[in-house]
Image (cartoon, grey):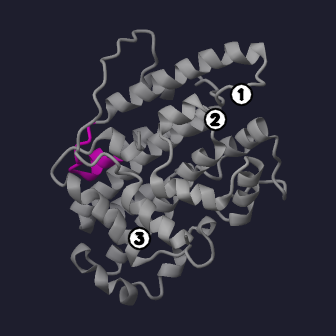
Amino acid sequence: MSIRVLVFACLALQPFRCIDGQEPARTPISRPQGPSLSDIGGAMPWHHIGAPLSPESAAPRVAQWQAEVAYFREAFEAIRQTWTGEAVDSPGELRSKVGRYEDLVRTVTDSGGYGNLLLADTLRRLSVGLLVRYVTAHPSDYAVVGEILETNRVRLLDCAAVGNMLTEELKLAPPSGQWHLSESQKELELIFIADGSSLHEAGLGMLVGGPGPSSLIAKRDITALLSRLMATESTERMVLAGFLEFLKQGGTVADLGSFEHIMAKEKSRFQFPPLGVSDATIRVGYIAALLKAYQPWEGRAVPFSALVGE
């Protein structure tokens, strides 16, 4: 199976696995001592959250992990409770809501660790979901969304937290002194091999959706976590950014068939090298798959579980 097929499937299916539009039933949680989003993004330093225990974990790490996983679960629940799923109607509201999520992405990645990267990916998926839904409803505001995408956003695959996690969990050092994961398929292959996996297996994980946050915080899976980051980053940096350029050049949602003509000179600017040489450049099919994924939620609240893949 080619990476191209995996990408099409990922964009069409991965963020939207809850097809009936209903959140899974949950028992209300009362946690008066748990952190709120204000606690996470406030002046107090956030906590380092590492990876789940392995059979070889020493006793001190066992006690440490119990505290870390409690922080993760409280933070994840706080994030979930902020999500209404409702469409945003104005540029000011969009900037405010996306900005809040992006501030939290910066906070948790600064604190580092496997668990915080999982929180960062969750936050980024909500952020991107707001942007995609807004621009499909307000295509003439493509410049507003483009400005947000270009303003002080953390590149998840390239942030220091990923490199520190690879050292912490796999004892792996970058081959050239610094990781360039968003630009190098070979470096990702090196990591997947060290984790006992492969790039192909990571792609298959993208195809079938892969484990969600609850599973990944229960059992360490570096390959699955990086697969999630790849899916999120490629959607934002290649597909959404390319779609915005298409709109800027005069394209319309109703006429995606004009994409190749309109974007002939521009599409090479919108690439995601980890997908491989032949699949790394924006294609009309990627955009069509992304827009199709949002169609079931037109005029309805998008469930948290649908965006996060939980």
Q: Is residue 90 one of those drawn in magenta?
A: yes
Q: In which quarter of the image is the C terminus?
A: top left
Indicate the amino acid at tag 1.
Ser
Residue depicted at 28% across the width and 64% down the height = 292
Furthest toward the top, the residue is: 32
In the foreground, 64 or 89: 64
Q: Is mark 2 on a helix, strand or loop?
A: loop
Rate crowding at label 2 as few (under 14), some (14 to 19) or many (20 or more) other CA atoms within 10 Å.
some
Rate crowding at label 3 as few (under 14), some (14 to 19) or many (20 or more) other CA atoms within 10 Å.
many
Residue depicted at 51% across the width and 56% down the height = 206
The residue range painted magenta reads 84-95
Q: Distance between the residues labelled 1 and 2?
A: 8 Å
- Residue assigned mark 1: 54
User: Could you tell me if the residues under marks 3 and 2 are in contact, i.e. CB atoms within 8 Å?
Assistant: no
Q: What element carries label 1?
A: loop
Q: In which quarter of the image is residue 141?
A: bottom left
Could you tell which of marks 1 and 2 lies nearer the N-terminus?
1
User: Could you tell me if the residues under marks 1 and 2 are in contact, i.e. CB atoms within 8 Å?
Assistant: yes
Could you tell which of marks 3 and 1 lies nearer the N-terminus?
1
Q: In which quarter of the image is the N terminus?
A: bottom right
Residue depicted at 33% across the width and 28% down the height = 81
The percent position of residue 17, horizontal first and vertical second, equals 35, 49
- Residue assigned mark 2: 220
Q: Is residue 37 one of those drawn in magenta?
A: no
Q: Quadrant of residue 291?
A: bottom left
Indicate the amino acid at tag 2.
Arg
- Residue assigned mark 3: 286
Indicate the amino acid at tag 3.
Tyr
Q: Distance between the residues labelled 3 and 2?
A: 30 Å
The percent position of residue 15, horizontal first and vertical second, equals 39, 51
Task: Decide if residue 96 is in sight here.
Answer: no
Residue depicted at 49% across the width and 29% down the height = 41
